Image: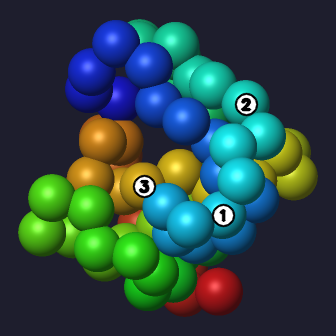
Amino acid sequence: MVGEKLHIRSGPGTHYGKTGVIKHGAEVQVMCKTNGTEVAGNSLWYKLADGRGWIAARYAENLNRIPTC
């Protein structure tokens, strides 16, 4: 993840409500990816495996292959 903190949202877009925050440097498990609101030129969003919500892929570093939701 890059940046100071990353908002977790209830759906794959910036118009969905915030459900939490991930601090810089934290590692999370991702279940799948889908297209949503474009953030800084990237429309991919990752669904967190723990069920907390979605994060914008633009601000996350992906180390593994992620299936489409």
- In the image, which disc is placed on residue 25? none
Name the residue at 49% across, 61% down: 14
Which residue position is annotated with label 3?
A: 56
Name the residue at 53% across, 51% down: 55
Q: Secondary structure at mark 2?
A: strand
- In the image, which disc is placed on residue 16? 1
**11 relative to 15 in the view: left or right:** right
Q: Secondary structure at mark 1?
A: loop
- In the image, which disc is placed on residue 20? 2
Q: CA distance from mark 2 to mark 1?
A: 12 Å
| Image quadrant in which you'd find residue 22 | top right
Q: Amino acid at mark 2?
A: Gly
The reply to whether residue 48 is in sight is no
Q: Quadrant of the N terminus?
A: top left
**68 relative to 62 in the view: left or right:** right
Q: Quadrant of the C terminus?
A: bottom right
Q: Position of residue 25 (x, y in %)?
A: 41, 12
